[in-house]
Amino acid sequence: MKEIEILKLDYFGRGIGYMDGKVTFVLHALPNELVKVVLIKEKKKYQVGKVEEVIRANSSREESLCPYFDLFCGGCQLRHMNKVAQREFKINRVKDLLLQNAKIERSDFKFLEGVSNDYRNKVVFHINGKEFGFYQEETEKLISIDFCYLLDNQINQLLPLLKELLNRPHQLERVMIRVGVNTNGSMVSFYGEVNASDIKNVFFGKVSTALLNDDILWGEGVIMEEILGKLFLLSPQSFFQVNTKQVELLYQEALSSLEEKHIHTLLDLYSGTGTIGILASSKVDKVIGVEVVESAVLDARKNAKMNQVDNIEFFCGKVEDILFSKTFPQVDAVIIDPPRRGLDGKTKEMLLKLAPSLLIYISCDVATLSRDLIDFLSTYQLDKMTLVDMFPNTYHVESVCVLNRR
Ligand SMILES: C[S@@+](CC[C@H](N)C(=O)[O-])C[C@H]1O[C@@H](n2cnc3c(N)ncnc32)[C@H](O)[C@@H]1O
């Protein structure tokens, strides 16, 4: 065990320092701290360690209160940092990456704070015998848990039942639990081997629907969620933002820029279950959604019907292929909400050819966002950028960029 000085934080909120001249990433360490570190991973060019003792603490250090955080369960990374420091960390990281990757000098972000706990509407637990939980950071050892501060209370209340089920014979690998925060709907979806009757004995009457290896045991196999007054049906495989309260702010932020001009066609790319397109449909003449996951597209079509939206159409396929193979008339605005890897070259090329006057880029990873922005900046101006803290206590932050064609 050695003492090291922490100089700054990396992208993942880990402290960076040097031990015997080698760069060392330290879990749960803060800048300007002097900490005793135990190494947990050694590579040729760097090593990873965890704090064993804080000798000199940063004033923004806070006691985590969560027993699993101290075991490095991987659910949270910033629970040792107070709220103000978390905000500063997220803003500074965005500022630095924009400057470094896209040469954009900017710090005037609006930052929409979220509640620290009880915000996740979905969880996936790994299962090992009678235990369930998350994989430990850097080791993939299962950290068995009984509750998680990040989860919606409805999910935490189901965890004693999960324990009860795992006491019965089974060879389950994982379970996904998802709840409708505004509707009280709930879903458990198990993967692996177990008697369906055991799931029924434990969970029937306690959740609205249950599935085993994607076969419905009871209920509709979907749950509902209400966002900004519209209802959305969600299948187990369909993507849905995990923080119901904050996603309303995120969507409002993205949709507010549609009000400034008349829009004929809006493309909602990476449309998931159709949430953004359906919420935008009353502000534009026509919406076209594109999404690769078939169940999400089926959900999106049902969602449009359920909300009586008839100016929307969804295509199932990869954005890069659909943009290449189809022509869409009068596309005035495009909303892009890609997964963490961001946009590929073909998609960027097609978007530049399409040349909508308004481009709204929703991103969950500022590293790929800043890389992608470079391609748009010669023809588009970044007029507004909002950070929405969808994931307090973790290193993640969501952002909405509004780009207008010059
Ligand atoms: C960050 S989610 C956004 C979903 C939706 N906009 C929402 O707010 O719920 C990204 C979505 O992109 C989809 N996706 C991933 N790669 C894709 C691709 N190449 N083409 C189309 N959709 C893709 C995923 O299935 C997922 O639904």
Image (spheres, grey):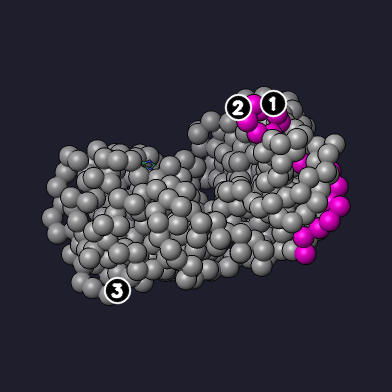
Hey, which residue is sitting farthest bottom in the picture?
A: 260
Return the disc, 2 or 1, that comes first in the chain's sequence.
1
Which residue is disc 2 drawn over? Answer: 192
Q: For label 1, count other residues whose C-alpha is less than 10 Å away and answer few (under 14), some (14-19) or many (20+).
A: some
Which numbered marker is on residue 259? 3
Q: Residue at x 76, y 41 (%)?
A: 50
Q: Residues within 10 Å of mark 2 (few under 14, many from 20)?
A: few
Q: Is residue 282 left or right of residue 145?
A: left
Label 3 packing within 10 angstroms: few (<14), some (14-19), many (20+): few
Which disc number belongs to residue 170?
A: 1
Left or right, 62 with respect to 197, comes to right
- Going 67% across and 63% down the picture, which residue do you hit? 85
Q: Is residue 77 above or below residue 253?
A: above
Real-space Cα separation, disc 1 to disc 3, in angstroms? 54 Å
Which element is circle 2 on? strand
Q: Which quadrant would residue 51 be assigned to in this image?
A: top right
Q: Secondary structure at mark 1?
A: strand
Q: Quadrant of the N terminus?
A: top right
**Secondary structure of the residue carrying numbered label 3:** helix
The type of residue carrying mark 1 is: His
* Dominant secondary structure (helix, strand or loop) of the stretch shown in magenta: strand
Q: Which mark is nearer the camera, 1 or 3?
A: 3
Residue 309, magenta (yes or no): no
Q: Where 287 sits versus 203, above or below?
A: below
